[in-house]
Image (cartoon, rainbow, N blue to C red):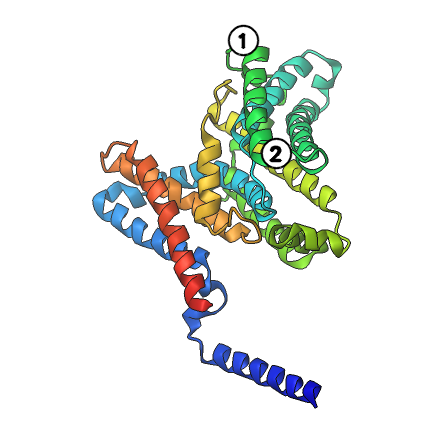
């Protein structure tokens, strides 16, 4: 009798829940109920304001400039989002961008004088592999220290930030490294070319975002990533290899940083030791603004892209409007707090 009562109650609750869902307005369901939607609306409003403040803001040249600049941040934000979804953090990404870029440039220089110079694309391919290999090594070290040794992600990656940046200065003695060799034109086409007028960095960003969306929402690995962020102990009890997933997300985050650093080398024409200094804070800010929860369990590629674009729009708009660019830091901080506050209010109202 008691079980029948419980079943009836459960059925009533479920029926009521479905009725409530049915009565919910369109803007309270799916994407429109997420923080990403609110940030996208804020982005649209800011674009309109910036366009009114400076007529040059929506010019073709400036739009292309904004697209290219935000893509570097956006690519790394995709990797950072993976780490944050698991409840971790990676403060070393800016330094990894510099170290990978330097490794790539120096490898091209070293391979230029070898017999590989006569093989089309060989020096470029090996140089890019060297840069990405350095990134994998850093990510693997971060992941193992966090997952196997049990160190704090914040402390571990903060230490790696200093190590990677120090190595960048030590191996170059503070001098920028310029890629060179028989494949230099192909390298610039790969990193800084265009496809139908669209910068390569934008193409890579959109492609990687689409891939990440599929991985997170349609694969077992994606489910495991969210499970770790939701409840790591419960995830382990269900048979998920917590250590393997953690190591994987740190490697992928470093890989995204290394790839973005190599792309920036093609854009700048060199790999300076101070490349991407301070970028880690901007990247984390972009992920958080886009809806990634630092407590874990929430985040996605759409939010990462929108968050990165919002920050670049603000920076670019302030410059064109003749406003001190340092105000960007103030505005980004305010937007982070506002985004989290809106999400907290929305979540509380939903509960």
User: From what the image shows, is residue 57 above or below residue 111?
Assistant: below
Percent of width and height locating residue 131? 64, 26
The residue positioned 65% from the left and 84% from the top of the image is 6
User: Which is nearer the N-term, disc 1 or disc 2?
Assistant: 1
Q: Which of 307 and 53 is in front in this view?
A: 307
The residue positioned 51% from the left and 53% from the top of the image is 302
Label placed on residue 214: none
- Report the residue marked by disc 2: 254
Which quarter of the rendering shows the N terminus? bottom right
Residue 250 left/right relative to 22 = right
- Report the residue marked by disc 1: 173
Q: Is residue 280 visible?
A: yes
Percent of width and height locating residue 193? 52, 34
The residue positioned 42% from the left and 45% from the top of the image is 309
Q: Distance between the residues labelled 1 and 2?
A: 23 Å
Q: Are marks 1 and 2 in contact (CB under 8 Å)?
A: no
Q: Which of 276 and 16 is in front in this view?
A: 16
Dot 2 lies on which element?
Answer: helix
Percent of width and height locating residue 205? 54, 43
Percent of width and height locating residue 267? 48, 28
User: From what the image shows, is residue 156 above or below residue 147?
Assistant: above
Considering every residue shown, the one lying at the far bottom of the view is 1
Q: Can residue 188 be seen in this view?
A: no
Residue density around tag 2, few if under 14, some if 14–19, many if 20 or more, within 10 Å:
many
Considering every residue shown, the one lying at the far right of the view is 239
Quadrant location of residue 317? top left
């Amino acid at each position: 009798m008691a079980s029948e009562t419980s079943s009836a109650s459960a059925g009533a609750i479920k029926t009521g829940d479905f009725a409530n869902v049915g009565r919910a307005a369109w803007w309270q369901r799916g994407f429109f109920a997420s923080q990403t939607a609110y940030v996208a609306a804020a982005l649209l409003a800011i674009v309109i304001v910036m366009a009114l403040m400076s007529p040059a803001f929506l010019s073709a040249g400036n739009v292309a400039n904004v697209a290219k600049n935000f893509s570097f941040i956006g690519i790394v934000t995709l990797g950072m989002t993976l780490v944050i979804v698991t409840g971790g953090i990676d403060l070393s990404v800016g330094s990894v961008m510099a170290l990978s870029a330097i490794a790539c440039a120096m490898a091209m220089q070293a391979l230029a004088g070898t017999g590989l110079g006569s093989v089309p694309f060989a020096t470029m391919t090996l140089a890019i592999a060297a840069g990405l290999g350095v990134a994998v090594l850093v990510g693997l070290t971060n992941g193992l220290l966090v997952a196997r040794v049990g160190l704090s992600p914040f402390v571990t990656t903060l230490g790696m930030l200093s190590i990677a940046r120090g190595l960048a200065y030590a191996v170059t003695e503070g001098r920028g490294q310029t890629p060179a060799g028989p494949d230099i034109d192909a390298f610039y086409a790969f990193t800084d070319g265009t496809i139908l007028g669209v910068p390569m960095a934008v193409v890579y960003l959109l492609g990687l975002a689409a891939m990440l969306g599929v991985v997170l929402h349609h694969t077992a690995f994606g489910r495991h990533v969210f499970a770790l962020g939701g409840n790591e102990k419960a995830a382990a009890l269900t048979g998920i290899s917590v250590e393997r997933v953690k190591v994987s997300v740190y490697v992928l985050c470093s890989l995204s940083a290394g790839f973005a650093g190599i792309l920036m080398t093609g854009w700048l024409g060199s790999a300076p030791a101070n490349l991407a200094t301070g970028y880690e804070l901007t990247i984390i800010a972009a992920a958080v603004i886009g809806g990634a929860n630092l407590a874990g369990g929430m985040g996605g590629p759409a939010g990462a892209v929108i968050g990165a674009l919002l920050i670049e729009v603000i920076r670019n708009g302030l410059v064109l409007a003749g406003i001190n660019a340092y105000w960007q830091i103030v505005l980004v901080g305010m937007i982070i707090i506002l985004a989290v506050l809106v999400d907290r209010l929305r979540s509380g109202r939903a509960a």
